Image (cartoon, rainbow, N blue to C red):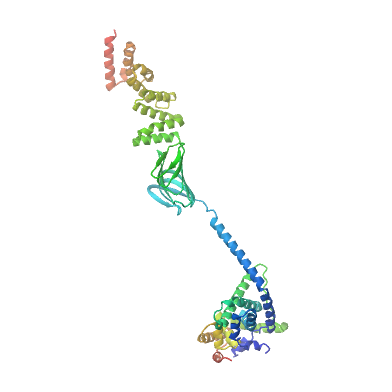
């Protein structure tokens, strides 16, 4: 799979954050470059269809650069950045909702690549999964995307979400059950090993 | 049953090329950041200035005037018009204006006004007789039949009376602005009489007569006639009687009799004759007796005829007096 590299990418090292905090624009840009794929992926996964994830990811990085000086603990950077992403996504959704009510508003749907037939097939599968995913609470959706789709360990998810590992596990369990229920499937063997063991 | 991860992978993959696109966009934005930051600060400054201007406008915006009717007929009532102006009223009036600039149109009764000193507050109390302007003080305005009385308890008030008096009143000072119409001055005279303030009655009647016409003028003349007579000013009283009778208004006989008897008492028959003649012409039997007594010395026959004519309508004391007069006349007449 050509895009598999993005899913399995490890989180950038903490040193980049320390360099950015003590360095100049060059170090800040290096930090932004390292985190850009992760931020983009979160925006694409959590934003859903019809969502301009590129625009949102760009805004997250710009916000990160502006507010980096206020970060006190480099170890908290992943959770801090995920928090910025979460707020930016919420803002974009709110703006999209408002735009619907504005006169002469144009709601853009981004076409999938691969021609009309492929577009229809992808759209059907995509729509079903996304419908089930969007029925979940934001907390469940986040933990499911991070642990199941991005194959992150429970520890990594805990760092990004800024919550204890135990909470990640229980939240993931509940999210899986709910997601399956939304898909109309029965409970299968839980893949708790993903959470516990990581990659 | 499908694996959960497989189902999730049905979601479209993010476009790998997008990362490069976004990176270029990010670098472009960062290059423009200093200029944007400067524009942001300019915008924030402009917004702050606009907000400050709005706050200033709001703070200095003129307060909308309001109005409140004051009616306390039995017990005094407290009114807190604003932090700077408080009233206690027993009577009727209307207060209007703003919290720092109020006018009280006071109709009747007493209004006690307290204005916070040095609070840049203007209060004006307006009655029919007075205009009292204050800046930070405590005072009463009482409006009754006597007029509008201003009593100062603290500070100083500037008083303009409708009667022409104008001045400042300090702590403990009091002034009454006189009524400005003849009928109200007549009412003031009655109130003064009831209160025993006889000294002030004369000037009040004089002021009323300067303004009066018609029945009110007659009533004022009658009052002054009695007042003057009571003080021994017979000529003055008779002058008032003459003035009254020049424009008769219902009490002619009473005024004629008062003037006739007053003349007879203090001036003698010669002065009383004109009054008594008029009373005789009006058919007043008891006044005919008095006229006959005056004529007895100079025209006894006419006096006897008058008494004989009057006798049938006299009774009691006056009948006995007429009989005695006739007996005396028989002694001098053939």
Q: Position of residue B131 (x, y in %)?
A: 47, 42
Q: Could you tell me which residue is drawn at 63 percent across and 73 percent down?
A: A96
The image shows residue B264, relative to residue A61, as above or below, that is above
Image-quadrant location for residue B328: top left
**Depth check, front residue: B273 or A8:** A8
Q: Residue furthest top?
A: B334
**Depth check, front residue: A107 or B126:** B126
**Depth check, front residue: B165 or A197:** B165
Q: Position of residue A18 (x, y in %)?
A: 58, 83
Residue A118 visible at all: yes
Can you say which quadrant of the picture contains the N terminus of chain B? bottom right
Q: Position of residue A165 (x, y in %)?
A: 52, 86
Q: Residue furthest right?
A: A115
The image shows residue B119, relative to residue B295, as above or below, that is below
Can you say which quadrant of the picture contains the C terminus of chain B? top left
Asked if residue B104 lies left or right of residue A118, the reply is: left
Q: Position of residue B170 (x, y in %)?
A: 41, 44
Q: How many discs mark residues in the rendered view?
A: 0
Image-quadrant location for residue B53: bottom right
Residue A140 visible at all: no
**Depth check, front residue: A8 or B175:** B175
């Amino acid at each position: 799979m050509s895009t598999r590299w993005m899913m399995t990418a490890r989180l950038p090292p903490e040193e980049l954050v320390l360099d950015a905090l003590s360095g100049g624009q060059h170090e800040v840009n290096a930090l932004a470059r390292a985190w850009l794929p992760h931020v983009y992926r979160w925006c694409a996964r959590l934003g859903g269809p019809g969502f301009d994830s590129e625009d949102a990811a760009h805004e997250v990085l710009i916000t990160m650069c502006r507010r980096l000086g206020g970060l006190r603990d480099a170890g908290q950077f992943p959770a801090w950045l995920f928090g910025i992403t979460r707020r930016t996504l919420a803002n974009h959704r709110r703006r999209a909702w408002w735009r619907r009510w504005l006169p002469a508003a144009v709601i853009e749907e981004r076409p999938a690549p691969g021609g009309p037939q492929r577009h229809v097939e992808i759209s059907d599968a995509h729509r079903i999964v996304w419908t089930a995913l969007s029925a979940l609470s934001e907390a469940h959706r986040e933990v499911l995307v991070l642990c199941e789709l991005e194959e992150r360990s429970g520890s990594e998810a805990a760092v990004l979400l800024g919550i204890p590992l135990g909470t990640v596990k229980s939240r993931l369990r509940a999210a899986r059950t709910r997601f399956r229920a939304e898909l109309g499937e029965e409970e299968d063997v839980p893949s708790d090993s993903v959470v516990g063991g990581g990659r | 049953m499908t694996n959960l991860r497989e189902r999730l992978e049905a979601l479209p993959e993010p476009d790998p090329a997008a990362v490069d696109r976004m990176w270029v966009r990010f670098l472009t934005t960062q290059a423009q950041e200093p200029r944007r930051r400067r524009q942001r600060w300019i915008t924030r400054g402009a917004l702050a200035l606009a907000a400050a201007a709005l706050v200033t406008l709001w703070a200095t915006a003129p307060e909308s005037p309001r109005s409140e009717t004051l009616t306390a007929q039995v017990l005094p009532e407290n009114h807190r018009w604003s932090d700077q102006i408080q009233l206690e009223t027993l009577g009727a009036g209307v207060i209007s204006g703003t919290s720092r600039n109020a006018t009280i149109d006071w109709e009747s009764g007493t209004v006690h006004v307290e204005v916070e000193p040095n609070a840049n507050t203007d209060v004006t109390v307006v009655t029919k007789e007075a205009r009292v302007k204050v800046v930070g003080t405590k005072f009463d305005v009482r409006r009754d039949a006597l007029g509008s009385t201003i009593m100062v308890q603290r500070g100083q008030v500037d008083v303009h009376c409708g009667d022409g008096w104008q001045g400042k009143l300090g702590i403990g000072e009091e002034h009454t602005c006189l009524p400005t119409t003849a009928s109200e001055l007549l009412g003031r005279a009655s109130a003064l009489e009831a209160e025993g303030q006889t000294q002030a009655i004369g000037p009040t009647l004089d002021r009323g007569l300067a303004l009066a016409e018609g029945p009110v003028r007659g009533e004022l003349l009658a009052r002054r006639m009695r007042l003057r007579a009571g003080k021994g000013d017979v000529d003055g009283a008779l002058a008032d009687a003459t003035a009254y009778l020049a424009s008769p208004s219902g009490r002619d006989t009473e005024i004629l009799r008062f003037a006739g008897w007053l003349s007879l008492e203090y001036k003698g028959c010669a002065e009383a004759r004109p009054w008594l003649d008029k009373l005789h012409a009006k058919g007043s039997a008891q006044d005919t007796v008095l006229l006959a007594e005056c004529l007895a010395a100079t025209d006894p026959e006419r006096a006897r005829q008058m008494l004989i004519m009057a006798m049938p309508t006299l009774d009691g004391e006056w009948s006995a007096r007429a009989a005695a007069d006739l007996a005396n006349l028989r002694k001098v007449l053939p």
